[in-house]
Image (cartoon, coloured by chain):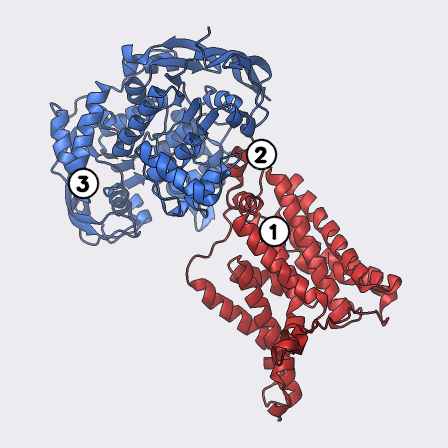
Chain colours: A blue, B red
Amino acid sequence: MADALLTLDGLRKAYPGVVANDDVSFTIKPGEVHALLGENGAGKSTLVKMIYGLVKPDQGAMVLNGVPFTPANPAAARAAGVAMVFQHFSLFDALNVAENIALGMDNPPHPRELSQRIRDVSNAYGLPLDPDRTVGDLSAGERQRVEIIRCLLQDPKLLIMDEPTSVLTPQEVEILFTTLRKLTAEGTAILYISHKLEEIRALCEHATILRLGQVVDTCDPREKSARELAEMMVGSTLHVPSRAEVAPGEVILSVDGLSLKSATEFGTNLHDIHLEVRAGEVLGIGGVAGNGQDELLGALSGEALAPGAITLKGEAIGHLGPNPRRSRGLLTAPEERLGHAAAPDMSLTENALLTGSVRKHLTEKGFLKWGAAEAFALRIIEAFDVRTPGPDNAARSLSGGNLQKFVIGREILQNPDVLAVNQPTWGVDASAAADIRQALLDLAHHGAAVIVISQDLDELMEVADRFTALNEGRLADPVPTRGLTVEDIGLMMGGISGDMTDDTAEGAA
Amino acid sequence: MNLDQINPILLIASLMVAATPILLAAIGETVVEKAGVLNLGVEGMMITGAVVGFAIGVNSGSPALGFVGAAIAGAALSMLFGVLVLYLLSNQVATGLGLTLFGLGLSALIGKPYEGMKVPTLAKWDIPLLSDIPVLGPILFQHDPMVYVSIGLIMAVWYVLKSTRAGLILRAVGENHDAAHALGYKVIRVRLMAIAFGGACAGLGGAYISLVRVPQWVEGMTAGAGWIALAIVVFASWRPWRVLLGAYLFGGITVLQLNLQAAGVPIPVEYLSMSPYVITILVLVLISTRGKHGAPGSLGRIFHASH
């Protein structure tokens, strides 16, 4: 195989109690986009850390360009032409763009020369970037550009990207893909890790599928459907959420003329929002990130007060805070798992207490009922298949998908009359996402009203009875999901966001 | 009351001397905190430097050797803190407080035989020509060498942090240790070196009190200077030149209020004595409310290189 760029042969890495990778072998060719697929915990991260020199393999060998490749540290990997864009950005907020990039280089040129090169390279690849700006002030997409430019300045032969699109808007994803295609045309190989199967189908020519640390399959993702890919990852037939037809009942929650100024400087103000949800119905709210999703959920949860605008079962609740709303049956689960929906360093029992104390009566006269709280946490863990050693573990120690199951499960088990969730399956692997969607549908089936805010249109099509979209803080009139076309959705999302939806949908088709 | 006794030239000249111990300790702590470590043991390292510097000064007859010994002693004590915090992952706040208590006790023990002794002190430099300039000469160019060393250190730290790769790496480690580790930088090694530098500076600051300012050994003689140094670092927003400003402000008001006491100003002595602390903190708070605060992102957080 003279044309192989990187060959992995029988790589194995074991940690105490778990084999992260076992006998992993595959080949990456120059100029190809190679996808690495697998559920959370399948060993993708460990594998790329071995290639990038952060972790040493216990067994096996790597060959880069025909030469044995055993990077002792990331600097050695970079010197050999391997660059990596991290899932959680490895950036320094207080430093400026040029300083951040200099830190990722082994022999950075003089600052003035470096700034010029940053401008040149970033413009050449369509990722404009000002080297003097402080990284802390940049958007998620711009921050990722910093990482990518940092890699590109080293002229890498292999670029590793770990979940690069999880924090990007669809527009930014398109720009990124254009850049990546330009790179592969120049002969750079890309190892691409993502949960988003449609993206992999649009971008990658070759896929290696990992399950429990082993290579279980390889394929050309362009010839497979997203569902087939998901089933290869999970190793069993994927359960597609099923929906039982229920005639919607009476209106439980109505929002009437809600206008709200955002609490944060960079937030979106809400303008004159009207919506109604009925018992047994799922209302899907789409839209590109940053169009008022967080603010709308905050207004529903009671974090932001909106006197007179919200009615729950005939009672005005707009002036009430979160706990009175919980006791009346309106529960919410915000987007950010760590730090908003759950307190990262507190145990699962404590986190169960935090929102469950009102409806599950977990406190008495100001004292905590630990036994009852732990029993509640255990019920969530069991009912929602949360993988954790026990309820005493800190929320931070759970993987994203498991914590999300816990956070959603915690609200569902409190038997809400109305449940509003924001991005319920963000960064969650395919099987956990299917479980969460099924749970939301079951909840509606049992007579609750459910509001799902999401940027994943496929998800909304799967679960929602009616669909609407947020655009610059305004909500379109809801329409039935059945029979809705991509064009309709694009029009509802409005302006540029509508165009983008068309593009991504076509790219995926 | 006789305000005519106060000579502004002497006042400014002596404020530089009064501020030097705090300046030395604070610039060291700035580097430590820029690397992401909060060492609350400054007071303990200062007093240890004071007693070791004094003892070596007495025994060898050389104040210069005393300063060298004080720097080594401060660095050695800080390494105790470094090992506990960086390798054994102990809590930085608790360990730093423990270091201060340990240093106070240890210095009392070492210093017992030296109480009431005299020590040769540093000679003042009369820099030729420059010291003859009217007004500026006596203010700027008739000090002992450590005053110039302390200003040189401020300049060096400012330059290294701002313009060198080593400084950039140090700031990166303090800003986000996980990211620095992911990029392949040795977080623990960088921090250990920063802590040692901070310890050596605190030791020098302490020795300046016992060898130049007082010059005598008295138990507990640093009298909270280490804590003021810590406060100055925070309110100076971790910037070297503001550290200089804060230290000289504190030194200036200390000297001024002593002069006012001597002149018999009809303000209760207690108010005058507390004024340096109050005014320094007020001024630096006013400065730091504007613009960015700039606390290093990983300050005080425990780093563990888990995979």
Query: Mark 2, residues whose alpha carbon is within 10 Å: few (<14), some, or many (≥20)?
Result: few
* Residue at horizontal 81 percent and vertical 59 percent from the top: B65
Provide the residue designation for mark 3: A471
Picture quarter containing residue A307?
Answer: bottom left
In the image, residue B26 sits, relative to residue A405, either above or below, namely: below
Residue A379 vs A112, above or below: the answer is above
- In the image, residue B274 sits, relative to residue B206, either above or below, namely below
A46 sits left or right of B11 in the view: left
Mark 1 = which residue?
B32
Crowd class of label 3 (few under 14; some 14 to 19; many from 20; radius 10 Å): many
Q: Residue at x 69, y 53 (%)?
A: B199
Subunit bearing disc 3:
A
- Spatial CA distance of label 3 from label 2 is 43 Å
Q: Which of these two is toward me, B193 or B289?
A: B193
Q: Amino acid at mark 2?
A: Ala
> Does residue B28 appear to the left or right of B298 in the view shown?
right
**In screen coordinates, is A227 left or right of B188?**
left
Picture disc at residue B305: 2
Given the image, on which type of amino acid does mark 1 rest?
Val
Residue A24 appears anywhere in the view: yes
Give the percent coordinates (x, y) of residue A77: 53, 25
